[in-house]
Image: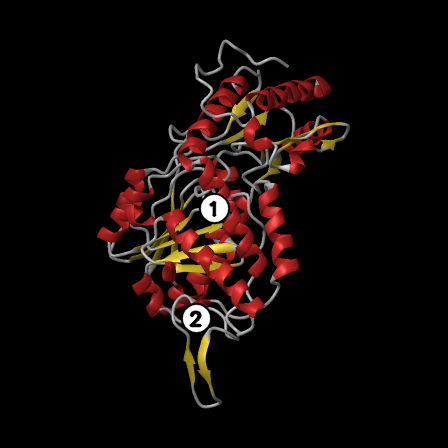
Amino acid sequence: MNLNQDILPNREISFDPILYRKDFPILNREVNGTKLVYLDNAASMQMPQVVIDSFVDYQSRFHANVHRGVHTLSQEATDKYEAVRSKIRDLIHAKSENEIIYTYGTTDALNMVASTYGRQNISTGDEILISEMEHHANIVPWYMLAKEVGAIIKVIPITDSGEINMDAYTSMLSNRTKIVAVTHVSNALGTINPVKTIAELAHQAGAIIVVDGAQAVPHAKVDVQDLNCDFYAFSAHKMCGPTGLGVLYGKFDILNSMPPYRGGGDMIKSVTFEHIIFNDVPFKFEAGTPPISQVIMFGESIDYVNNIGIDRISEYESELLSYATKRANEIEGLTIIGTAVQKASVLSFTLKGIHPHDIGTILDQSGVAVRTGHHCAQPVMDRFNVPATTRASFAFYNTFEEVDELISAIHQVKEVFG
């Protein structure tokens, strides 16, 4: 299908996704007899060949444990592994690499904060504020903590456009508020939240702020010092990296005051049956053999994205979303869920009279991969009174032509259900 020139943004070709698509071998495959159109990037982005190659390089040249050997392979693995910590520091503009903790994902990182800082600092009657648009990973750990210690969960409402109601948030803050937990970018709606303002108001009330940044880091510049957040969590697989690896940023003084999350090797300085001395930050939070190959792969992912330029990526993806939104609004019976002014590259929608799972199945037959369901954000679905949505999410390697393929496939869905 040709691009709809009437609504295509006027733009000089300063960003050409074709230059990068060749780096992603999976984008060349066919699905159900047609070329893959991968629009499930909010779930996981695909990996470029250079990231895949780094896994083979580690396994074939210096596969060894880190921090625990004087032999050459162990030293090489350790050097590569720790170099990535510095890359992550620079990626999110942290003050020190000692503020960077490797985890097993965003979910693991948020559970770590709830289980360590939370248990240490939250008591009966204290309040934890969570927005209505949170992923379950930023709801369930706080619910479990509140149930354990007798704290109170309060829900910050969102507007009909899918934005945090800032007036309501401000009125909910009090001296009982101890933690504010919010997403930087909603995985279900695409809303970009004003985290800096949210953090400032939380701190004025004497609370800390915990940010789920899983959907933000791959798509826009993140500066944790400018945001002044106390914790920030994200995952590698959302940014051209592997699964099984996440990152928790925390302000050093807070991390240093927290107890360990897990016990085992490498998180200790000495162990006797009478006394244990824990390791320094960040190592006291990294018990056991870590995901070494995943860390090394993520380092390559960071280099790859940095070479493109996160600002260029953000600008291009914004144009893609704008085009997709305009095309989607042309379809009778289609309702976009989440219409915030500030949005990342997520298009979540319903189609009148057709269940999202049926939509996703027929789109897949056309080679278009999207996500259907509640997106691990059931309270969002409840807020908009829908059981589920279909979500198309875009990355820098997607094209305007692929948006047209999506729109064409949606029309096919309507024809099937007549």
The local secondary structure at tag 1 comes to: loop
Three-letter amino acid code at disc 1?
A: Ala
Asked if disc 2 and disc 1 are in contact, CB closer than 8 Å, the reply is: no
Residue 131 in the image: above or below residue 176: above
Whether residue 212 is visible to the viewer of this picture, yes or no, is yes
Q: Residues within 10 Å of mark 2 (few under 14, many from 20)?
A: many
- Identify the residue at horizontal 68%, vertical 22% (top origin): 413
The local secondary structure at tag 2 comes to: helix
Q: Nearer the viewer, residue 328 or 271?
A: 271
- Identify the residue at horizontal 68%, vertical 32% (top origin): 28
Tag 1 residue: 214
Q: How is the image coloured?
A: secondary structure
- Identify the residue at horizontal 51%, vertical 65% (top origin): 78
Q: Which mark is residue 36?
A: none
Q: Is residue 207 left or right of residue 99?
A: left
What is the C-alpha distance between the residues marked 2 and 1?
23 Å
Tag 2 residue: 284
Query: Which of pointers 2 and 1 indicates the residue nearer the eye?
Result: 2
Three-letter amino acid code at disc 2?
A: Lys
Q: Nearer the viewer, residue 22 or 62?
A: 62
* Residue 287 image position (x, y, % from top left): 51, 70
| Sooner in the amino-acid sequence: mark 2 or mark 1 | 1
* Residue 230 image position (x, y, % from top left): 33, 55
Whether residue 391 is visible to the viewer of this picture, yes or no, is no
Q: Quadrant of the N terminus?
A: top right
* Residue 365 image position (x, y, % from top left): 73, 28
* Residue 285 image position (x, y, % from top left): 45, 67
Q: Residues within 10 Å of mark 1 (few under 14, many from 20)?
A: many
Residue 159 in the image: above or below residue 10: below
Residue 321 in the image: above or below residue 301: above
Give residue 39's quadrant in the image. Answer: top right
